[in-house]
Amino acid sequence: GTPVDRTDLLSKDPGGAIYLVLGRLFKVHALFDDILLDLLASDPTGVVLLVGEPQEPLTIKTYERIQRRGLERNLKTDRIHFIDYWAYMGALATARVVLDTHPYGGCLTALDALSNGVPLVVLPGPAERGRHAAS
């Protein structure tokens, strides 16, 4: 399937916390899918927003993988959405918290969050490439 662009969530209250994932989708590892699903299972009103890629096939591939994982775990994925790549800065302005990707962490995206006063949640990865944001 194809994810619906939910950039509209940036201009209205989705009813719960917006957990924003600024990292590029090639850094959104399958291990991170479970973290997102567990987060939403523990926060019944939260919404996860991932920034889609200008290259639509990568956005679709990531969306389908998260959908499959949710089905495997019998967890809903209806509160995981993708927003337009060009809405990045607007998303950052409305986010309550930014989640660093795991196990491949961010660097510039972490700086974007912190320089805009948005709290950043980091789970350091086992390798150096997953620890930039933690430093």
Image (spheres, rainbow, N blue to C red):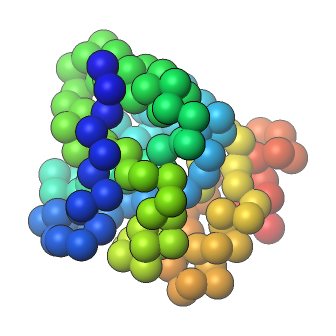
Report the residue at 38% width, 60% height from top.
19
How many numbered callouts? 0
Report the residue at 42% width, 52% height from top.
84
Q: Where residue 67 sits in the image (x, y, percent)? A: 32, 23
Query: Is residue 131 shown left or right of residue 103?
Result: right
The residue most toward the right is: 128
For the N terminus, which image quadrant? top left
Using the image as rendered, state which of residue 41 and residue 89 is in the foreground.
89
Query: Is residue 114 shown left or right of residue 57?
Result: right
Q: Is residue 27 above or below residue 71?
A: below
User: Is residue 41 at all visible to an observer of this figure?
Assistant: no
User: Is residue 117 at all visible to an observer of this figure?
Assistant: yes
Q: Quadrant of residue 35?
A: top left
Using the image as rendered, state which of residue 10 and residue 133 is in the foreground.
10
Q: Where residue 110 sits in the image (x, y, percent)? A: 66, 66
Q: Where residue 28 sits in the image (x, y, percent)? A: 58, 37
Query: Is residue 20 shown left or right of residue 121?
Result: left
Report the residue at 54% width, 86% height from top.
117
For the C terminus, which image quadrant? bottom right
Report the residue at 24% width, 62% height from top.
9
Q: Where residue 38 sits in the image (x, y, percent)? A: 34, 40
Q: Is residue 10 above or below residue 65?
A: below
